[in-house]
Amino acid sequence: MDESVSFVKQNFLNAFGESPSVVSRAPGRVEVLGNHTDYNEGYVLSFAVDKGVWAACGGSTTEQIKLLSSHYGDSPITLHETVPQKENPWTNYPLGVYAVLRDNGFPVRPFNMAVYGNVPLGAGLSSSAALEVACGIALTTLFDFQVEPAELAKHCQRAEHTFAGTHCGLLDQFSSIFGKKDHVLFIDFRSLDHQTIPLPSHNLCVAVTTSGISHSLVESAYNERREECARAATFFSRSDPSVRTLRDISPERLMSAKGALDDTAYRRALHIVGENERVLNGIQLLRQGDLVQFGKLLHQSHESSRVNFENSCPELDTLVDIAGMIEGVYGSRLTGGGFGGATLSLLDWESREEFEAKIREKYTAKTGAEANVYFASVDDGARVVEP
Ligand code: GLA
């Protein structure tokens, strides 16, 4: 049995004196291309990775929910009320999922749960979505009801909005659910249609490099970007009510608004419109196996983040610059929300040792901070592991 499964089952047994009825697993995700496009109803390429969250779950005979995380202490936390928690903020993710499912009429009841995760925290791999999805899947199995996977992603997103207070898009939960081993997931966030595209080369290596930087205002900066994008969309919808979001704006139309739209909103829109274009081009390049051109799109994406969306930071720029100078690297960019966090780099398998050594050495020399490189395998989406 997978070590992580035995570990989380043992934790459950130690805490609750019986074996869990269900064990689920949900992966972290990497955003490949399509930055901040999800809440603008645009396009994204992403995949799920081999690091994730395992949730062991069983029914309770009491009216309380009891949660244990191997990251946060040895004894379970008992929750008496289904309201957002100020203490032990991590409990908001499972509790939020439970509350949203219950409020949507699903037959959930109080439960006991032990969770274990190996997604690096604060690395931009969305450990929080993995926790929500693992919890959602465990509860549907434990209480024996069906939820369409895309609906489950939305319930998990709602939990994050209402319990954790982050107004994220749907990318993280969706990727954790629909990821496919050795495939890139293409998602249209207007229709929620999605397809998978095989990774073009078995020689391809995926590196996620954490910058060690986490912006203290990351949530407010994220929400501010959302508002700026909405402001840009409103500018267009005033004269054309068919415009709902920046998804409806072509590059030409945006360009014709330069000067009329305020500069900040214009640059935010330029990023989103450009990202949508890059994703659509990127799909063709992946299908043709053209990693060289695909890699260039990653660099363009980062540049646009740096200049237009202003969600990069000097440390992420340094990581991307160093990666760009290493032979065998196709492309590199910040991944996820930005304002710190991690970069994604695509490289040849043979370059991985040199990549790790150079990144670590040069990054520390330049910034004084420490970078960590994690070579990810592209994995399947969430599932029930037991029974
Ligand atoms: C975070 C959010 C996602 C998405 C990305 C940026 O990861 O949770 O919904 O907006 O940032 O693309």
Image (cartoon, rainbow, N blue to C red):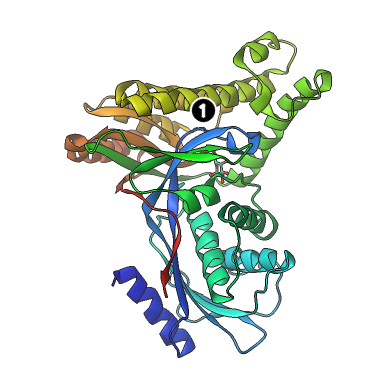
Left-right relation of 287 to 95: left
Can I make out residue 352 in this image? yes
* Mark 1 crowd level (few <14, some 14–19, many ≥20, 10 Å Cα): many
In the foreground, 25 or 336: 25
Quarter of the displayed picture in which ligand 1 can be seen: top right
- Quarter of the image where the C terminus is located: bottom left
Q: Is residue 386 above or below residue 382?
A: below
Can I make out residue 217 in this image? no
Q: Position of residue 180 (x, y in %)?
A: 40, 48
Residue that numbered label 1 is attached to: 305
Instruction: State how many labels appear.
Output: 1
Q: Position of residue 60 (x, y in %)?
A: 59, 85
Using the rendered view, name the quadrant where residue 230 is placed: top right
In the foreground, 41 or 330: 41
Q: Position of residue 212 (x, y in %)?
A: 41, 46
The residue sitting at 37% across, 42% down in the picture is 183
What amino acid does circle 1 point to? Ser
In the foreground, 76 or 214: 76
Badge 1 marks a residue whose secondary structure is helix
The residue sitting at 28% across, 37% down in the picture is 359
The residue sitting at 24% across, 41% down in the picture is 356
Q: Position of residue 30 (x, y in %)?
A: 43, 44
Q: Is residue 103 above or below residue 155?
A: below
